Image (spheres, rainbow, N blue to C red):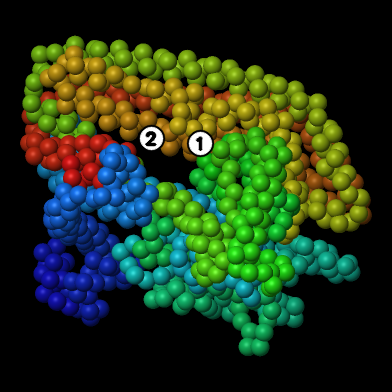
């Protein structure tokens, strides 16, 4: 421990913890690297811990500000040298226009430009955040305007995180692909290690630490107890039958992984504590944290929570695998640029029979902005499982989700048959030719998949042919030809902080403008006139939105009415096809699983069975086109035909009319953009609930029938289950009308909520701008000038050219 840490603890009023920090050898270097778990171990009381975290955050801000100032000075010195170089004549560039030179620079130096751009903007963002922290501290809580401004400053901070969901069967090369893309060769194990089909693996960046971390979240003890009961029922029912059933093998696989051979011999309670000695966190309903210095060490430790050995080799007989108890594993990679604002999620393709795992799976799938479907190149266009996965999730990621892009990724593109006698050039040409053929075949297959096309256009579907091995070794293909670099570039674009920086800086500029405008008192004489003008504009704009929403509601009402009539006319045939798809005991067991699980059965292999979705299909089909048009995932125009995006107070015109109120109008302009972005995010979340309400209503109404059908046992069980379900649907055929009404009600609530939020926030902002005295506000003229300069720099050029001008403007 050094004097710096001791002095800081005393300064922060935490002198009683000095000895603890001394014992743990915390010095000035390690102080700022402490994570939440380490802080909790050092300071065991909540009050002092909160105080410590707050002061540590401010300390980091001060250090970042000092570093940023030093870096800016270094860059300015570098530019002075560059300016001297640029005045020298260049024969190779003679006769070229400035735009041509810039184009050449962009083409030849794009990686450096991206780093330079991100570096420059990080300085700006850090600087403006420090400014706003300082302004926030100077505002008091004694008047409404100050309280309003403090809240606005707090609301500037937004955490941008994109979810990329990765689907693909075991052996398709998912692990090798992900390892190659994020440049962590040995992170996800492959080869002799078999992936289980139920554990989700999230990959995120870990900041402020150089250690690798895995956080394991378990299912509850009650859920595992229920699964054990289901396994016992399944195994008892299969005693005298051929044991080729997928669900039978699934039960045996899970029990063997966790208990070895003991579950076969022992009649003891498999919930006894002795079976969970290595994972006390499971019994305590806590998450387990693994922290390691190296990627190899972490991979070796967390593998037992996600995988099993394909063969129990020598020395593995007594080894336990805990994945049957695991809900999700979050792996955090230190300072990984590809994961800074992106979470990659390795997902099972079919959800899970465990309800909490399935609920988490649905939530993650619905939140994915991009989905990767990974399959081997050999039969990519005709690969049944890959297309079945995409079809089964299409409604969850499309109208029922946020997905903007589907990437169909064909792996192992370097593997060729009979290539031993060919030259390197011939092998290269054959690989490239087959890649083109594979892409063409996959695109044609996509165009034939009507179930997917209802939710996605050709523009949102892209095909990649990749080779992780060639990317690492480069024997026949260049890195670009492996297309790993394209996927890396895609992740870099998702991680691009330009929009975050622009939004924060422009928002800060608006807030500072309002503070300075309130202090200037230049608009006092015309406050009433300005206020009335703004209220008139807001009411007019809200009325335009209201009219568009009413037309949308009418369109949905018509579509759903058609869907109700079709549902009433077709449910009998749908039930017949579903209930009489098989006459043997195998189907009896499948139907038993369906009714025991609320109309849904997720077999270990094969297609998801969901009777609720089948019954709701005419309703969802009737609205799919209108829904995608109303709530597009991939359109810049926005929801409700873009009418919310078009909302405007026309502040540029008002500035010309009321010059003295320019600063207040600048604030209102930034508020206008901010609220539209907020509403856009809100609608992406809420529209999923509107869409899913159709199937959920059917599911709720069918629940009673499923429970009755599940009670039957023994001889005649199949007949009784069929008849019970048929009779229940027939007696509840008004459920289609109820589903329609529920969806329309949720749609109406969403519309009302949007209008109320927009009206409340804009009118409150206008009120605070023109009807509040700013006498108690600090002078922020210097801060305003600094942030205005940053705003001008960020707005001066297109995104990809900002770095060229940020430091020279």
Quadrant in the picture for residue 783: top left
On screen, residue 244 versus residue 93, left or right, reads: right
What residue sits 23% from the left and 50% below the top? 90
Nearer to us in this view, 287 or 469:
469
Q: Which of 776 and 232 lies nearest the eye of the viewer?
A: 776
Q: Who's the residue at 56% across and 27% down the image?
A: 629
Q: Nearer the viewer, residue 787 or 249?
A: 787
Q: Look at the image and tell me in which quarter the C terminus lies.
A: top left
- Identify which residue, 795 or 664, lies in the foreground: 795
Neighbour tally class for label 2: few under 14, some 14-19, many 20 plus, Cα within 10 Å: few
Which residue is outermost to the bottom? 314
| Front of the two marks 2 and 1 | 1
Please indicate, yes or no, whether residue 713 appears anywhere in the rendered image.
Answer: no
Can residue 743 be seen? yes
Task: Please tell me which residue is depicted at 39% across the width and 62% down the height of the picture.
Answer: 336
Q: Which mark is residue 678?
A: 2
Vertical side of 720 occupied by 683: above or below: above
Q: Which residue is the site of mark 1?
A: 634
Q: Is residue 358 left or right of residue 505?
A: right
List x then y, in percent, for residue 144: 18, 31
């Amino acid at each position: 421990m050094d004097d710096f840490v001791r002095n800081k603890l005393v300064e922060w009023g935490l002198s009683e913890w000095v000895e603890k920090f001394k014992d743990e050898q915390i010095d000035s270097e390690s102080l700022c690297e402490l994570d939440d778990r380490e802080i909790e171990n050092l300071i065991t009381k909540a009050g002092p811990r909160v105080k410590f975290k707050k002061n540590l955050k401010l300390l980091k801000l001060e250090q970042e500000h000092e570093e940023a100032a030093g870096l800016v000075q270094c860059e300015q010195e570098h530019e002075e040298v560059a300016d001297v170089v640029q005045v020298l004549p260049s024969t190779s560039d003679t006769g070229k226009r400035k735009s041509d030179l810039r184009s050449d620079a962009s083409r030849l130096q794009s990686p450096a430009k991206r780093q330079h751009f991100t570096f420059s903007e990080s300085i700006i963002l850090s600087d403006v955040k420090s400014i706003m922290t300082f302004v926030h501290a100077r505002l008091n809580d004694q008047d409404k305007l100050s309280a309003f401004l403090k809240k606005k400053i707090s609301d500037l901070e937004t955490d941008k995180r994109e979810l990329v969901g990765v689907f693909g069967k075991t052996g398709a090369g998912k692990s090798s692909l992900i390892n190659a893309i994020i440049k962590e060769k040995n992170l996800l194990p492959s080869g002799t290690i078999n992936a289980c089909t139920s554990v989700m693996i999230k990959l995120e960046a870990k900041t402020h630490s150089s250690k690798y971390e895995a956080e394991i979240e378990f299912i509850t003890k009650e859920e595992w107890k229920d699964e054990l009961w289901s396994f016992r029922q399944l195994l008892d029912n299969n005693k005298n039958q051929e044991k080729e059933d997928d669900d039978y093998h699934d039960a045996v696989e899970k029990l063997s992984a966790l208990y070895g051979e003991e579950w076969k011999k022992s009649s003891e309670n498999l919930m006894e504590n002795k079976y969970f000695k290595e994972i006390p966190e499971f019994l305590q309903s806590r998450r387990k944290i693994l922290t390691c210095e190296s990627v190899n060490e972490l991979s070796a430790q967390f593998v037992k929570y996600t995988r099993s050995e394909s063969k129990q080799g020598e020395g593995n007989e007594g080894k336990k695998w805990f994945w049957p108890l695991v809900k999700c594993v979050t792996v955090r990679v230190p300072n990984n640029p590809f994961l800074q604002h992106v979470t990659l999620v390795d997902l099972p393709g079919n959800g899970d029979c465990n309800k909490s795992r399935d609920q988490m799976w649905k939530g993650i799938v619905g939140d994915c902005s991009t989905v990767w479907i990974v399959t081997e190149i050999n039969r990519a266009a005709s690969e049944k499982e890959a297309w079945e996965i995409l079809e089964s999730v299409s409604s969850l990621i499309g109208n029922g989700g946020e997905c903007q892009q589907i990437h169909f990724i064909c792996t192992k593109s370097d593997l060729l048959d009979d290539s031993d006698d060919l030259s390197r050039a011939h092998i290269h040409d054959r690989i490239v030719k087959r890649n083109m053929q594979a892409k063409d075949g996959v695109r044609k297959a996509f165009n034939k998949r009507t179930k997917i096309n209802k939710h996605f256009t050709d523009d949102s579907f892209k095909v990649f042919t990749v080779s992780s091995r060639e990317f690492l070794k480069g024997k026949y293909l260049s890195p670009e030809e492996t297309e790993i670099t394209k996927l890396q570039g895609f992740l870099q674009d998702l991680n691009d902080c330009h929009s975050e920086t622009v939004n924060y800086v422009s928002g800060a500029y608006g807030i500072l403008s309002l503070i300075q405008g309130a202090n200037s008192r230049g608009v006092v004489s015309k406050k009433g006139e300005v206020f009335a003008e703004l209220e008139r504009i807001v009411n007019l704009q809200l009325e335009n939105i209201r009219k568009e929403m009413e037309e949308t509601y009418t369109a949905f009402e018509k579509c759903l009415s058609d869907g109700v009539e079709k549902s009433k006319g077709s449910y009998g045939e749908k039930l017949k096809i579903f209930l009489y798809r098989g006459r043997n005991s195998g189907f009896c067991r499948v139907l038993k699983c369906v009714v025991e699980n609320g109309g849904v059965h997720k077999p270990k292999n094969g297609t998801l069975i969901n009777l609720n979705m089948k019954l709701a299909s005419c309703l969802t089909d009737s609205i799919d086109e209108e829904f995608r048009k109303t709530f597009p995932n991939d359109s810049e125009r926005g929801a409700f035909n873009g009418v919310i995006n078009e909302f405007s107070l026309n502040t540029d015109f008002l500035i010309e009319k009321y010059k003295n109120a320019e600063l207040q109008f600048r604030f209102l302009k930034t508020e206008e953009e901010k609220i539209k972005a907020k509403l856009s995010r809100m609608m992406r979340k809420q529209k999923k609930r509107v869409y899913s309400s159709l199937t959920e209503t059917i599911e709720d109404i069918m629940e009673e029938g499923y429970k009755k059908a599940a009670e039957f046992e023994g001889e005649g069980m199949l007949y009784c289950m069929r008849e019970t379900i048929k009779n229940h649907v027939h007696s509840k055929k008004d459920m289609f009308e109820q589903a329609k009404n529920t969806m329309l009600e949720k749609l109406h609530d969403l519309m009302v909520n949007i209008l109320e939020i927009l009206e409340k926030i804009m009118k409150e902002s206008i009120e605070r701008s023109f009807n509040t005295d700013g006498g108690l506000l600090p002078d922020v003229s210097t801060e305003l000038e600094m942030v205005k300069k940053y705003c001008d720099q960020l707005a001066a050029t297109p995104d990809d050219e900002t770095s060229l001008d940020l430091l020279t403007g």
